[in-house]
Image: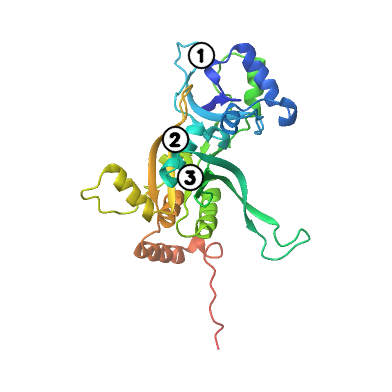
Amino acid sequence: MYGIAEWFGRAMAELTSEERVEYAKKAQQPIEEAHMECPYRTKTFGKPMLCNKAGGVCALASYSQDSTASAPTIAPSSVCICPARLLEPAVFRRIGQAILGSEDMFLVREVPFLQNAVPSDNGPTFKAGRIDFVIVDKDDRSKWCAVETQSVYFSGQNMGMEFDALIASGGDLIMPVGRRRPDYRSSVPKRLSPQLMLKVPQLGRGKYLAVIVDEFVYRQMAPLAEVPVDSCEMTPEELRLEKLALSEVIWFIVALRTNQPTTIETERYTTLAHSIQAVDSALPIPMNRFTANLSQLIDDPSQRGDKVIPLFAEPS
């Protein structure tokens, strides 16, 4: 059963009872009124930044409770449900080093990327799309790469019932009262696949798109094939640079651990096609089986008029 792992940037298990009640009341307010700081945005952008997620829940984790225990145990590995939870200066610096070879760089957020093809009242440069982040070399502005972050949504009962239950319990650490789970399929393929298909071709040859996801998202994906290279007599860094030269999308999979900095666990150097196939996490049914399934549907009398509609020529 999944419940709150991190809330307004704090580990749920380490909050006091008073803090849980306070956070629950803040979570019930509009984000403008709650006025809670997001430590991940603040650390990354170098100035105080407010939480912009309704309810303030950063991540979920699995809860369990032994019959003899007075409080539940929260799994140490969490699932990001707010993209701000993926923000970490060290991760962006590694991306800049890995892709651009840069040590000093700028991080630019929400960069306009597309414009309407048809002029509007706002003129022909009306912004029609943005890139989450762009990392730019400090000395050579022509050296840059795009960065997208992707978290998951959850399916199940509204988080508001957890806030009510925490207030009613006086802030005790309790098992979740609602059933919910991280929902990969309703979020990542539906959002990230279109973003990749739209942005990667437009970036052009020699420009890269980096994608930051957590370990949960990576585990839900189909195997992510890297670009093939001949690794004979190459050092690890030479091999990595060879992969980079052949790649379009570079994946940075990060680990989320309670009270630990977000760290990159895996880097994968891939093409757009391999990325889409992995994100969609689905493979085509073999043609012979697809044809057999069609025949089975057509021959099933219960499907006539529902899934199977005869469109026969009128007899002459």
Element at label 3:
strand
Residue 187 visible in the picture: no
Label 3, on which residue? Answer: 211
Q: Are marks 2 and 1 in contact (CB under 8 Å)?
A: no
Element at label 2:
strand
Q: Residue furthest front?
A: 139
Task: Give percent across and percent down for residue 306.
Answer: 55, 62
Task: Give percent across and percent down for residue 203.
Answer: 52, 57
Depth check: give the residue in front, 266 or 140.
Answer: 140
Residue drawn at the location 48% of the way across and 40% of the way down: 213
The first of marks 2 and 1 along the sequence is: 1
The first of marks 1 and 3 along the sequence is: 1
Quadrant in which the C terminus is drawn:
bottom right
Element at label 1:
loop
Q: Are marks 3 and 2 in contact (CB under 8 Å)?
A: no
Amino acid type of the residue that numbered disc 2 sits on in the rendered structure: Val
Label 2, on which residue? Answer: 254
Residue drawn at the location 47% of the way across and 54% of the way down: 207
Label 1, on which residue? Answer: 71
47 relative position to 152: left or right: right
Q: Residues within 10 Å of mark 1 (few under 14, many from 20)?
A: some
Amino acid type of the residue that numbered disc 1 sits on in the rendered structure: Ala
Given this view, does label 2 or label 1 mark the residue nearer the observer? 2
